[in-house]
Image (cartoon, rainbow, N blue to C red):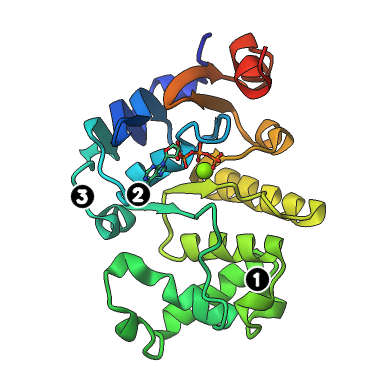
Amino acid sequence: MTTEMTSNQKDQSPLLEGRGVSKYFGGLAALHNVDFAIYPGEIMGLIGPNGSGKTTLFDCLSRVQQINTGEIHFKGQEISKKKPFQVAHMGLARTFQVFRVYRKLTVLENMLLSRQWRNESIFRQLRPSHPDTDQRARELLEFLTLDHLTYEQAGNLSGGQQRLLEIGMALMPDPELILLDEAASGVNPVLINTIKDRILHLSNEQGKTFLLIEHNMEFIGDLCSRVFVLNFGEKLAEGTPEDVMTNEDVIEAYFGS
Ligand SMILES: Nc1ncnc2c1ncn2[C@@H]1O[C@H](COP(=O)(O)OP(=O)(O)OP(=O)(O)O)[C@@H](O)[C@H]1O
Ligand SMILES: [Mg+2]
């Protein structure tokens, strides 16, 4: 399968590149010898059946997990020995498959607490915010259509609103690359459209780069220029959404023969 690249991408270095990345949990190869490249400004999809290693790849990229072999380069720097806050500070942000909002705190407080990239302790983060930080949080909440919920406890938000809040928290430090783990999961169709629209806006208007894990193929097809498929920790295919969704190996991996 060929990899679709625009002429623009061919001239650019990847923003993020992995070479021979492996991650083992005991005898299980969650990732085995995986190569990938993501170019500035693109929205790339990461798909694969349950347990194929998608979240593990995010964990390795965001430095929550150590890789066993290979290299990961972000903005030309090898990051596979860096700490999570260091890659966050370099401009790499992520959300989590399972919600990670503080349910008892307000939406605004959650946004202000997302400044983990500064490696500040939680007690320092809870101090009264700098006016600029407060302003940024409020602007992002408006951008994500959550401003009417600014003082609501995060636990009272719908699934889709919590996903949007997590995206907002990821955007607080103004990252260049945003990894979204199942941003459309548990979200009603109206808010799925809001999430899509905001991702496209961030990509088109601000040049942000995205890597999206998603089981919702319509979401992937509508947003992604390229898709990367994992199966049992190995790269199975890569190409345009149409290419991979009609690829027989991919169909077999999802549905069996
Ligand atoms: N911390 C861990 N310790 C041991 N095994 C793990 C750990 N994290 C993931 N695994 C295993 O690694 C494999 C890949 O898991 P991963 O969560 O990356 O899959 P996934 O593609 O994100 O799946 P899903 O679509 O269900 O979210 C699975 O077999 C999983 O059980
Ligand atoms: Mg996962």
Tag 3 or tag 2, which sits nearer the N-term?
2
Q: Nearer the viewer, mark 2 or mark 1?
A: 2
Q: Residue at x 47, y 60 (%)?
A: 170
Alpha carbon distance from label 2 to label 3: 9 Å
Q: Residue at x 69, y 62 (%)?
A: 159
Residue 72 in percent (x, y) is at 27, 35
Q: Residue at x 35, y 31 (%)?
A: 28
Residue 163 in percent (x, y) is at 62, 60
Alpha carbon distance from label 3 to label 1: 33 Å
Residue highlighted by disc 1: 142
Q: Quadrant of ligand 1?
A: top left
- For the residue pair 8 and 248, the one nearer the viewer reads as 248
Residue highlighted by disc 3: 82
**Amino acid on which disc 3 is placed:** Lys
Tag 1 or tag 2, which sits nearer the N-term?
2
Residue highlighted by disc 2: 62
The answer to whether residue 12 of the structure is visible from this angle is: no
Disc number at residue 15?
Answer: none
Residues at circles 2 and 3 in contact by the CB criterion of under 8 Å: no
Instruction: Describe the element under mark 3 as helix, strand or loop.
Output: loop
Alpha carbon distance from label 2 to label 1: 27 Å
State whether residue 23 is above or below residue 157: above
Q: Label 1 crowding class (10 Å Cα cut-off): few <14, some 14-19, many 20+?
A: some
